[in-house]
Image (cartoon, rainbow, N blue to C red):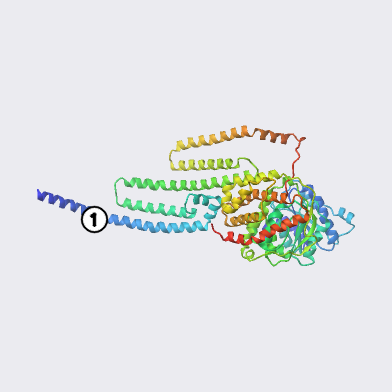
Amino acid sequence: MAEETLLTDDFLRQLINVGEVDILVGLPTHNNAKTIDPVIRAVQAGILECFPRERVVIINADGGSQDGTPERVTGASIDDVWNVSKVYALRTLHSISTQYARSPEPGTALRTILAAADLLRAKACVLVSPDSTTIEPDWLQRLVRPVYNDNFDMVSPIYRRQKFEGALMRNLLYPMTRAIYGHRIREPYASEFAISGRLATDFLDKEIWNHDWGRIGAEICLTVTAMTGKYRVCQAFLGTKAQPDRSARDLLAAMRQTVGALFSSLDSNFPLWSAITGSQSVPTIGALSEVMLEPVRVNRKQLWEMFATGVAELEPIFRSILSASTLSELQRIATLDVSDFHYPGDVWAKTVFEFAASYHRSVISRDHIVQALVPLYRGRALTFLVENREGSGEDIERSVESLCGEFERLKPYLLEVWADRK
Amino acid sequence: MREIIITELTQASQELARGFAHYLPRLIVMLIIAFVGWVIAYLLKLLVRSILRLTRLSKLSENSGATQLLKQAALPSSTELLSRFVFWVAWIGFILLGVSVLGIVGLQEYISRFFLFLPRLFVSLVILFFGLLAASFFSRAVLLAAVNANFRSSRLLSISIRIIISIFALSMVFEVLGVAEETMLIAFGTAFGAVMLGLAIAFGLGGKDLAREFLERRLATGKREEKEDELSPL
């Protein structure tokens, strides 16, 4: 099996000492010492409050932290949590840490955790982000219960967000996965989610691990697997999503992890998604969406400049990716002022679909195709910002819904450009 | 007089016939070699084409942008181009082998020179192909990275990279072919030096404010400018 080579001997020994478990909590980390403590405390409290009788293990897959993150995970005492919650676990809570690589690879971290879940025959496996400083103990229950008690195979989260946060999710990932795979999963790339042991084992056997995009974008592939296989998927509202240091967030890395992996998934799943029309909602526990209206300062001029410069400078690259009509439309949009700027939903959907088709045909290096989409995404993000500047939560919801409608309406166009061999 | 002319003519025609009879078998051998060579070259072409398809050279070529370059130059795909190259080199080789059978004085030396030149020609073509591939790939990578980093004059930077790598590849090609080695070396050195000097002057004069801003930001810790937030994508 794959996990024999993936898991170190020491890690295997520790897993054998733990034995079979009911719930496995996975924590993929890399230099998260600043934020890991409240996350661990919330996880431990969640286990004590909601699953005191279950056999639970916390597995930390670390990507070569230099700040003592793994020691913080394994050294976190449950005594403090006992004192606060006054609830005692009836089982020993194990915390194990393993270093899967010297540098972070999200896909390998997930694979390590899933391999551990497979070996320990966990009934439910829940992943928690080490950056989620807003995590509450009941998040664990909301994620695990549907899998553990109601036989769901995947629980995807819904967060309360600031109205302009998650722009890539709202403008590309959600509309596209919904149009392609026909499931209305709000967070196809989730930092917290729960899956059944069955899905974990099945996903481990997938071929994605042999590809580069499997190593960096496994989370979205997992969601796609859940949507395309015979698995029961639901969503659970968790609460406010913590935003990591926003200025340090690398948009390009995020695009590679999500858009690159999503585009790649289209190749192997073509027979499935090409037959799907429209979309259906998935069972949702709690609110479907909540937005916070607190103001955020965003440099709109810079977004506009980066879009306009991108359209002008990358024209030779766009010629090999986009159709002549879409490119000329983009060039027209690039001449608009910031105040009048508008990148319409239908043009955006066509742009994304043409990029997906070019990615499929590898008209140029696939990584370059994803990189070329970055300035165009900035243009769409600017439109999202301008359109919803004064908008309420309902307005945002309507705007996202309208964009999803455009993606679904233009799906035949994707099939057309997909088959086109220019 | 008449008899002498007739005798001479008879002798000449007999010699011509003898010569022709002497050369005819060689000519036939040459034609057979050329024909067999064509068959072998054609089979080689098919073999090379299949191997290249198996090794997915076209995918590599597409990914690096070489296919686009070839399309722009109205040339066939890289797989087709390489297999045709193998065909022609093999067939020309067989034709020259056939010609050598004719025993024409002086031709042997040129033929052997041609065969000695073949490996160098092949190596130089491979270098040229991969050089142009690298130039196209890296110039595009630089262009994308520069645009996404909001760097001004991204295209200028990208073109510079393409020119430098192309010049480098061409100078290597000429060195392998043994054509104007010194001239190419000097030309490459001059061109490379000029580009570097140009860049140094451009960055030195044009980027002094940028450099000062950068240093001020790095060193003056107390005076940190309040930055506007980036939109979180996920």
Residue B189 at what x, y percent from top left? 51, 35
Residue B157 at what x, y percent from top left? 58, 41
According to the image, label 1 marks what residue?
Answer: B21
What kind of residue is marked 1?
A: Ala
In this image, B177 relative to B56: left or right? left
Q: Is residue A242 above or below residue B221?
A: below
Q: Residue furthest front?
A: A340
Q: A393 and A230: which one is in front?
A: A393
Q: A94 and A416: which one is in front?
A: A416
In this image, A145 relative to B30: left or right? right
Whether residue B132 is visible here, answered yes or no, is yes
Residue A22 at what x, y percent from top left? 79, 63
**Disc 1, SS:** helix
Host chain of mark 1: B
In this image, A318 relative to A216: left or right? left
Residue at (89, 54) in percent of width and height: A84
In this image, B38 relative to B81: left or right? left
Quarter of the image for residue A144 reads bottom right
